[in-house]
Image (spheres, rainbow, N blue to C red):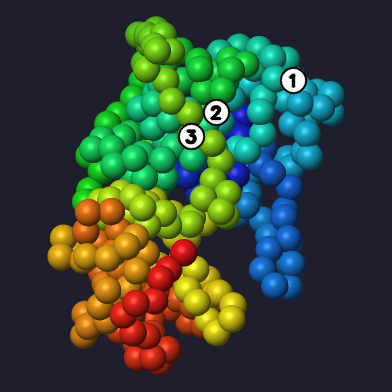
Amino acid sequence: MRIVFAGTGEFGVPCLEALVASDDHFVLSVITQPDRPAGRAQKLLASPIKECALRHQLTVFQPEDVNSSTTLSQIRYQKPDLMVVVAYGQILKKPILELPEMGCWNVHGSLLPKYRGASPIAAAIRDRQKRTGVTIMQMNEGLDTGDMLGKIATRIRPAETTGVLHDRLAGKAAPLLLELLEKAKKGKLRSALQNSAEASVAPRMKKEDGKIDWNKSPEEIEAHIRAMQPWPGAYTWIPDGQDQKMLKVFTVILSRRAKGKPGEIVEVNPHGILVAAKKGGVLLREVQLEGRKRMTAVEYARGAGLVAGVVLA
């Protein structure tokens, strides 16, 4: 099958690798986002998909607007059977969706119709879901509303962060994609409508979404911290003289014996920093003060002279 692949993030790399390795499919070209400045030096950085494409000597296009007439002409010239879209980052409009003979398929990191949108994996962990998965759909003009072609489910493991689950789901997406392409080749592919009544939306995460709400239960706080890794990162504010500094929190342990007002440090012990929440608390295990390196909470507390009674915001 002749395929144009559109993607940007790491999530799509296993799918692109699988298509390149398959004898049944030919990747005509790869469309990805333009190189973006990153880091303190603001050096232009290629997307993971571009790096993968160049390793395989594939033709790469990086339009600022994928729906432009120029991009449409480029795709039309290639005469693809199908366009596969994975974590691309731009909305495809009707002219592109209808251009390939088989339309466009999207690989999405949730069990649709749950968690449509840009941050489905983080949202599933944050909401303490027990299961999630990957859905491949026939794209339409809506936000992840197209007919479902196939899905695969998996259990969310107790200590899993968004980064770990992201990589695990990406690995499951590639064989699912090849399986559905094989069904399409044999004329055995079937689609299913999404039930909009069961739909939820997971918008793109923002930096401020990482802030810890100490008025929530210990279980909700622990899930929030895992969901925010690796980005935007879970954080709280800690008093520093007349000012406040950001304290990132990476790992915690649930505690039922913490008694205090939400956000209050009730104990500093050899195992970490015990902070009260709603009906219990959490023991901070790994933290990072802004401008400092990541360290154990015990090391941080010792260096900062931290004592009980300090309230985190």
Looking at the rendered structure, the number of numbered marks drawn on it comes to 3
For the residues carrying marks 2 and 1, which lies nearer the camera in this image? 2
Which comes sooner in the sequence, label 3 or label 1? Answer: 1
Residue 105 at what x, y percent from top left? 52, 22
Q: Quadrant of residue 96?
A: top right
Earlier residue among tags 2 and 3: 2
The residue carrying mark 1 is: 76
**Element type at marker 1?**
helix
Mark 3 or 1, closer to the camera: 3
Residue drawn where x is 37% and y is 64% of the image: 263
Label number found at residue 84: 2
> Where 301 falls versus 84 (above or below)?
below
Q: Secondary structure at mark 3?
A: loop
Residue for badge 3: 202
Q: Nearer the viewer, mark 2 or mark 3?
A: 3
Q: Is residue 205 above or below residue 274?
A: above
